[in-house]
Image (spheres, rainbow, N blue to C red):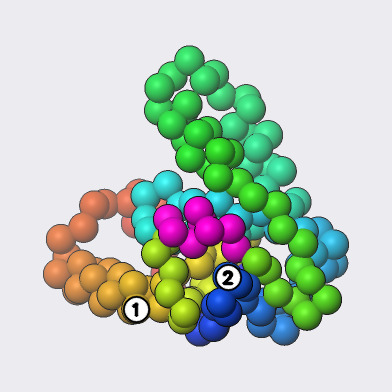
Amino acid sequence: MFRGASSLALDDKGRFAVPTKYRQPLLSEAQGTVICTIAINEPCLWLYPLTEWLEIETKLSRISNTNPRVRRWQRMLLGHATEYQLDKNGRILLAPALRAHAQLGKKIMLVGLLNKFEIWDEERWYQQMQADTEIEHSGNFEESPELENFSL
């Protein structure tokens, strides 16, 4: 399970070092193999341990691709899915197309979301957090039955 947000540097080659606290779980769960793809509805990337990603592929393979929305999801998720292996220094080299999709600059945020990470441009991440906070404070948001009885 991944949680927390880490500010990281993206080097000139497009690499970032996975924080130490996440390396061992990634190495244990999937021998350091991860899949990175574009987020469907936000300007960020999704990074999954291979084992989690294989479950997504299985789910996608069970849905008929005669539906145009399913095909779009498959094209976006599978078409951009890129496999990476953590190098000996715990780094991942992101493909230029993925970096371009998320408009990543030199500073990025790696955000743990239980079974995956989001990768954001740092400035964009803070803008998104501000927007999300404002929406929640305003009360002007879409209802979610899953959160109706959720308690913290």
Q: In this view, does 7 lie above or below 119?
A: below
**Residue 124 x %, y %:** 34, 72
Q: In this view, does 110 lie above or below 80?
A: below
Q: What stretch is highlighted in magenta?
A: 94-101
**Residue 138 x %, y %:** 14, 69
Residue mark closest to the camera, 1 vs 2: 2
Q: How far apart are marks 1 and 2 (CA)?
A: 17 Å
- Amino acid marked by disc 1: Glu
State the residue at coordinates (63%, 27%).
61
> Label 1 belongs to which residue?
123
> Label 2 belongs to which residue?
14
- Visible residue check, residue 4: no
State the residue at coordinates (47%, 26%).
71
- Is residue 19 found left or right of 119 in the rendered image? right
**Residue 91 x %, y %:** 70, 74
Give the secondary structure at mark 2: loop
| Image quadrant in which you'd find residue 129 | bottom left
Task: Judge whether residue 127 is colored magenta.
Answer: no
Question: Which disc number belongs to residue 12?
Answer: none
